[in-house]
Amino acid sequence: MAKRDYYEILNVARNASEAEIRQAYRRLAMKFHPDRNPDDQVAEENFKEAKEAYEVLADSRKRVAYDQFGHAGVEGSAGGGYGGAADLGDIFGGVFRDIFGGGRGGAGGGGQYRGSDLRYALDLTLEEAVFGTTAKIRVPSLVSCAACAGSGAKPGTKPTTCSTCRGVGQVRMQQGFFSIQQTCPRCQGRGTIIPEPCETCRGGGRVEEQKSLSVKVPAGVDNGDRIRLAGEGEHGEHGGPAGDLYVQIRVKPHPIFTREDNDLYCEVPIGFTTAALGGDLEVPTLDGRVSLKIPGETQTGKVFRVRGKGVKPVRGGATGDLLCRVNVETPVNLTKEQKDLLQQFANSLEGGGKRHTPQEGSWLDGVKKFFEEMKF
């Protein structure tokens, strides 16, 4: 079966430039690549046909031979031919470099590389994390050079096509039956050379700047949460897309509250008489005060739950609770009269057959049993 004309396959004129040929090939490769057309034999054949045409027409030496002698002039030199068995690795590896730019996570051809992602640690108070806030931050970043518009070339000049790879950014090495395609060592895959570098960015196309950003922090964030700001990372090289900025949340310790998931905890000291007789106590929350009813005979360590005074989850759901753990305080700095009164009170508790200190009594019973079991 006779092969189709390479110019016809790529749908370009016979005097098409290298850039037009490359663009036509990328369009067809994206359309017919086997990964996009699984189990489609026709698409696979179209893909191989387009790649064979591109490999000939993108090489100036092969193109001259093809223009003069047709397919006979390049017989055996087109790596992506219909046989394809000797160059399958290049078909499925090189095409991704041609389409997506290859190397260093490139996002496009001509040496355009996606910028790096950045990370910023944002310290928040507990109140800011629970209720949300808008934070102003300053981030050091590499941005496109204004002097050269990111080209890297001195103003008034422009990059020139690399003579080694002829602007493709890739060079091909023939090793027997195998064809190996790799990044051009002269232009590092950019396809262009900068004869006169920009003095501001020294040819890099990017300069370091401090940029100010507003970060909207949603209510309910916690330690370790991340907020992604798309496109706010480093600018890409030579016009490539920018990376992302990830804002890492760090919540500072609070003098009263601690947080566990969506609940808040606090320690509440109460007096001896309040614990014994009961009473009402005002306790703080993050949005005001609430009254906590303390029943009589409350012991240290008792936890009281205040519903809905915790944290509303950032991803939705029920608001957490506030849990107050009481600590009964022993009176200090007593006068002689107060000590005498307490002694009288203690004497009044003795006898009568009732236990007024349940935990102490049960603990003493446990100790007594322990020593009895130790006897031989």
Image (spheres, helix red, strand yellow):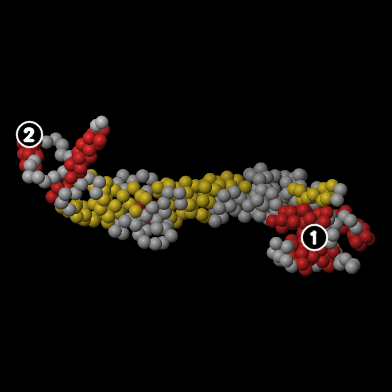
- Kindly identify which numbered label has been placed on residue 76: none
Name which residue lies at 24% across and 32% down. 375
Q: Nearer the viewer, mark 1 or mark 2?
A: 2
Q: Is residue 108 above or below residue 39?
A: above
Say whether residue 50 is visible.
no
Label 1 crowding class (10 Å Cα cut-off): few <14, some 14-19, many 20+? many
User: How far across and how far down the image is residue 286, in percent?
Assistant: 30, 53
Q: Are marks 1 and 2 in contact (CB under 8 Å)?
A: no
Query: In which quadrant is the N terminus drawn?
Result: bottom right
Q: Which residue is mark 1?
A: 51
Most extreme residue toward the top, as rendered?
376
Query: In this rendering, would 250 be left or right of 36?
Result: left
Name which residue lies at 73% across and 66% down. 39
Q: Is residue 61 above or below residue 2?
A: above
User: How far across and how far down the image is residue 359, in percent?
Assistant: 20, 43
Name which residue lies at 18% across and 45% down. 358
Query: In which quadrant is the C terminus drawn?
Result: top left
| Amino acid at the residue labelled 1 | Lys
Name which residue lies at 74% across and 56% down. 92
SS assignment at label 1: helix
